[in-house]
Amino acid sequence: MVRFALRTESRLLFAALWRRRTMALLAVVAVAIGAAVTSALLIVSRDVGYQLTGELRALGPNLIVTAADPMGPSPLAGGEGGDARDAGAAATRERYLDEREVRARLAEAGVDGVPVLYALATVRGHPVNVAGTDLDHLRRLHPSWKVAPGPHASLMGIRLMRRLGVEPGEPLTLEYANGGHAKVAVGAVVEAGGAADEAWWIPLADLQALTDLPGRASVAEARVEGVPSAIEHAVGTLERGGDMRAVVLHALSATEADLLDRTRRLMAMVTVAVLFAALLCAFGTLTDLALERRREVALLKALGASRRDLVRMFGVESTAVGLLGGVSGWIAGVVLAQLIGREVFHAGVRVQWSALPLVLALSLLVANAAALGPIRFALGVEPAAVLKGE
């Protein structure tokens, strides 16, 4: 009996919408447009964090770890964002970090970083800024650096290479003030656009041996990501014990947070505006549809239909409109999100399937809110007056 009743209601619903398919289609289109824009912006908004993080990661490290209470800045704390790092990356010749301890502390804090030892050496009578570090790790922290692909024994800044008049592969002798010396082959050229272009980057162990500073580092360059609370937790972990100082380059961190916040707020405002416009369009269309059914509503009331029956009838119709609009809008939104990704970010945007339930829920909410007008109209119909033609 219940199955028969449901089947009968389904047939009546289909017949009611099919007879006025033009008006019903307009309501579906209104909801679909709102769902399309909403789904596109949700997909882009959730993926934009990864996109912006990838773009801003090219700026390089945004955290410098030094020995506590350093006396002066390092001459080589450069690269992308060199001015900020020069001001924040302080290390002295008297105070150094313990390489093993700083690596352990970075791992405990969940921060991607690498120790760097700075020294001033002499090459062919010219003073040269030398930095010892894990070269492969350093290149990962500086994705914007222009370096020839492949492994390299050392990396030399393009300006330094031109000043010395040397070529890649040429062996040079590094001489340090304590009398230490080492022969190192010139590796690949580095174009960083900052102080790194005046430096010679060699393996950390080699520079430690040259300067007679085994297991020591001047600073650690790192990149910390996440919400401000996560950054504060990482800084607290690095500074625990008071022997280290972690300096966050707030200019870069604030840029990331500000861009993400502004982008998501803009998308949220556009989404609300589009959904409100879709609600108004669907409200007007469904209300016009109800006006055309005055005699049908009056006849149902005359035959004994209760207020609950009328509310259920219009509610089921609006739910069908919401589902059709939501599904079709989601499909269109996925296509629109890909278009936005290619035109704005020049990259594909991953489909966020977790946003589908939210889009369908918002579509149903819009459609059912738009049905309040027709329901109110239907409940106010006087059967006798309408059936008389008044």
Image (tube, rainbow, N blue to C red):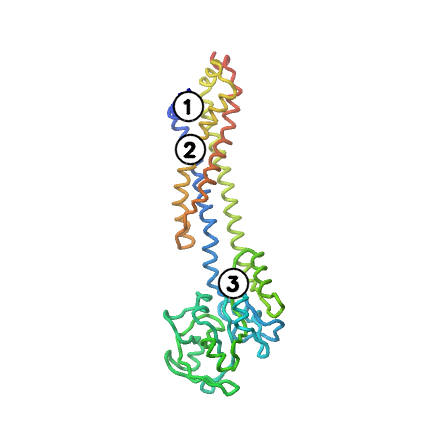
**Tag 1: residue type?**
Leu
* Residue 28: numbered disc: 2
Is 341 placed above or below 371 here?
Answer: below
Image point (53%, 67%), residue name: 104
Q: Secondary structure at mark 1?
A: helix
Taking 338 as reference, is 56 left or right?
right
Tell which circle, 3 or 1, labels the residue nearer the N-terminal end.
1
- Residue 13 % position (x, y): 41, 24
Using the image as rendered, state which of residue 220 and residue 61 is in the foreground.
Answer: 220
Mark-to-mark CA distance, 3 and 1: 59 Å
- Residue 166 % position (x, y): 39, 81
Is 74 placed above or below 273 here?
Answer: below
Question: Which residue in the structure is indicated by mark 3?
Answer: 111
- Residue 276 % position (x, y): 51, 37
Q: Is residue 389 visible?
A: no
Give the total of numbered labels.
3
Question: Which residue in the structure is indicated by mark 1?
Answer: 6
Comparing labels 2 and 3, the label whose residue is closer to the camera: 3
Using the image as rendered, state which of residue 319 and residue 277 is in the foreground.
Answer: 319
**Tag 2: residue type?**
Val
**Tag 3: residue type?**
Val
Tell which circle, 2 or 3, labels the residue nearer the N-terminal end.
2
Q: Is residue 6 visible?
A: yes
Q: Secondary structure at mark 3?
A: loop
Mark-to-mark CA distance, 2 and 1: 23 Å
